[in-house]
Every structure is written in structure tokens, then in C-alpha cells.
Image (spheres, helix red, strand yellow):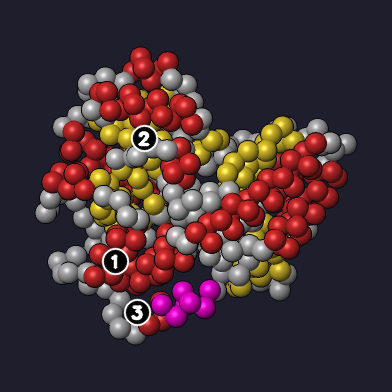
Amino acid sequence: MSYLFPNYKRKELELIKGAKQTLTDQKGQDYLDFTSGIGVMNLGYNDPELNQELLKQSNLLWHTPNLYENHLQEQTAEKLANGKDYISYFCNSGAEANEAAIKLARKATGKSKIITFVNSFHGRTYGAMSATGQDSIHEGFAPLVPDFVYLPFNEIEPLKATIDHHTAAVMLEVIQGEGGVSPADEQWIQAVQSLCHKFGALLIVDEIQTGMGRTGTLYAYEHYKIDPDIFTLAKGLGNGIPVGAMVGKASLATAFGPGSHGSTFGGNKLAMRVAYKVVERINQPIFLQDVQKKGQQLFHGLTQIAENNPIIKEVRGKGLMIGVEVSDQETLNATLEQLEAEGLLTLKAGQNVLRLLPPLTITEEEITKGLAILDKVLNNLVS
Ligand SMILES: *Cc1c(COP(=O)(O)O)cnc(C)c1O
């Protein structure tokens, strides 16, 4: 028997070590990784510099309560602001970052209605789950946190009909990750922002999966020329060390005064030491240009595979966040299994989307190798 709750569907495969973009299982089999542990290991596995940072801090001090000054939080927050007027609150996960964003939005505006979108994913705590626009994730957990409204993604009319002076915030992913790697239209996002301004609602962008260089810019919202009031980070922020952040306009500071919100572990010294280095490494023009270039290589390769493959319905995404929509769920499951057997680890999103999130440090050669495996498997499945 297992002593664990069966809330995850686990494979028998156990990954026991990693180096750069390669993982090794308990039998010594190597895999090329196109998952980054679900968008977490953006700088790859076993990175010597990050290992050093963690080791140095672990020999100095692991933890202090948030009753004391914390220069590691200050310097990481400054890096996250990236020259703009943003301040940060640190926590330990994506759901917690969204939880903070929801609380801040209600407190800052004195309003309660929060609009989110169908097929969004914002996490599993009560607030974040209630924000998530997927019935399957709510099942059995009613009553949810009140005053969340779910609207169709990429459609402006339903939003025009729903947003009003009681709306505290509109919350969205600029590319829906778990929901199926679905990018927002630029015009739609800009119209969403205008409506938020018109009704005094805050625009919250969930960058938990799209942030930290994943799409070829530090934050994915930069592609859309918008200026969110709040955005949230986690996954890639700590490259595997649990850490999350809620980043908001400095003008929101007074709504989160002393005693309003907090977390024992949030902004822990080990996490901050690593996160600082992660942001520093990712937020370099050369690094981000390289992500864009490799994203184009992967996207182009997939489009070529799709050209004469009837299983593939669409290739979409940005940078190194790419979805390949296949004909149905069964085909997707077979694809995932066969890719794994061929030594390539990939993910699923939505019902029938193959999701590719390789570490941002992936090489051109590894992309070529991954594409060859994808080509072989997807062609074998055409019958
Ligand atoms: C993964 C994810 C979350 C939840 O993050 P956790 O760390 O699992 O709580 C929230 N939003 C998005 C967009 C995500 O991809």
C-alpha cells in the first residue's frame, strides 16, 4: 500500500537525478526534458551557480521571521520591479501569490466582484480555486468563495456586459497554461485593460507559468503592451526552491499595511538567495533573445511536422511555451506515452494539447533532437 493520499495520478517512473536538460530515472535511463517540472526548472537541473548560492546561504542562516529586516527580499523585489514602480510580497507558491492578489484587490478597492475566465487555472487554495474557471476543479468543494464570475476568454462583449462599478478586479493569464496553452489576443487584452480603467477595477495578470523568461520576455504581459496593477509569480522564480511573489503597483501599498496579510515562510532566506540569482540570470537581453530564437526554432519545427500530419490541429504559444493541439484525448495520451518511451518527457494541457515547456537553457541541438523524436512519434500515430 501507499501511505500517500491518491490525489495525484503518478507514473511508476521516478526521476532521481538531473543535469542541465537531462533527467535520469531509477533504472539509469536518461530523458531529454521538455517539461521543466511543469515550468519550474527554467535554468535547468543541477546548476552549479544556483547550487553554490543555496549552499552559501544554508551555511549562514536558513530562516528568520518577517519581524526583521530582510535585505535578500529587498534586493529580489528590486530585481522583480525591473525599473518600474512595483513592490513585492513574497510567499511560497503560486496559489498563495494569487490568494494575496485577490485579498489585496478586494481591500484596495473596497469591492468584491472578481472576473476571471473559462479554462483559466489559478491554483488550489479556496480563493485561487474559486478564481479558476474550470468546473472539474470545483467539484465537491462547494460553497466556493463568493463573487467570482467566469467569462469566455478572448471575447469582449461578455466582459462589457458584466464589468461594473462593483468589480474589484479582472484576473487572467495572457497565455492560459493548464487550460490548453491558449494565447490571448493583443487587442482583447488591451480592451480588457481599458474596461478595468473605466470601472476602477484592478487588472491582475497571473504570470505563474508565463513569467520568468518563459515566453522570451521577463514577463509575458510585456508582449501585450499592458501595465497590470498586480501580477503573480511562482514556478520558475526559484528554479525548484518553493517561492512565490505577488507584485503590485507601489500605489497599492497602503491597502496591505502591517498586520493585513502574511506568511511564516514567505521570503525565506534560502528561497530569496536563489530567486535573486534566478532573476539576475534570466533578465539579461542576451538570455531572453536566445529564448526567443530557440522558441522560433521549436515552433517552426513543429509547424513543419504539422504540415503533413492530420493528427495535429494547431501549434500555438510563445517563446518556449508551446502547445500542440492533437485530434483527441486518446491520441494525446498515446503521444505522451510514446514520447516517454523514446526518451522525451512532455506534458499535457486541457483535454488534447501536448504542452512543451523545456528549460530555457535548452540547446539548439537538443531542440533538434526533441523535434526528431516528436516527428517520429506523431508520424507513427497516423494510421
Ligand atoms: C501552476 C499555476 C498556479 C498554481 O501554482 P502552485 O504553485 O501550484 O500553487 C497558478 N496559476 C498558474 C497560471 C499556474 O500555472
**204 relative to 273, above or below:** above
- Residue situated in front as seen by the camera: 141 or 213: 213
Q: Amino acid at mark 1?
A: Gln
Look at the magenta stretch and give its main secondary structure: helix
| The image quarter in which residue 196 lies | top left
Question: Which-is-in-front pick, marks 3 and 1?
Answer: 1
**Going by the picture, which residue comes out furthest to the bottom?**
59
- Residue situated in front as seen by the camera: 41 or 382: 41
Percent x, y of residue 236: 46, 58
Q: Secondary structure at mark 3?
A: helix
Marks 3/2: CA–CA distance: 35 Å
Numbered mark located on residue 57 in the image:
3
Marks 3/1: CA–CA distance: 15 Å
How many numbered marks, from 0 up?
3
Q: Secondary structure at mark 2?
A: strand
Numbered mark located on residue 25 in the image:
none
**Left or right, residue 360 beside residue 25:** left
Residue shown at the point (40%, 54%) measured from the top left:
234
Labels 1 & 2 near each other (Cβ < 8 A): no
Q: Residues within 10 Å of mark 2 (few under 14, many from 20)?
A: many
Mark 1, residue position: 75
Question: Which-is-in-front pick, marks 1 and 2?
Answer: 1
Percent x, y of residue 287: 53, 61
Q: Quadrant of the N terminus?
A: bottom right
The magenta region covers 47-53
Q: Residues within 10 Å of mark 1 (few under 14, many from 20)?
A: some
Q: Secondary structure at mark 1?
A: helix
- First in sequence: mark 1 or mark 2? 1
Labels 3 & 2 near each other (Cβ < 8 A): no
- First in sequence: mark 3 or mark 2? 3
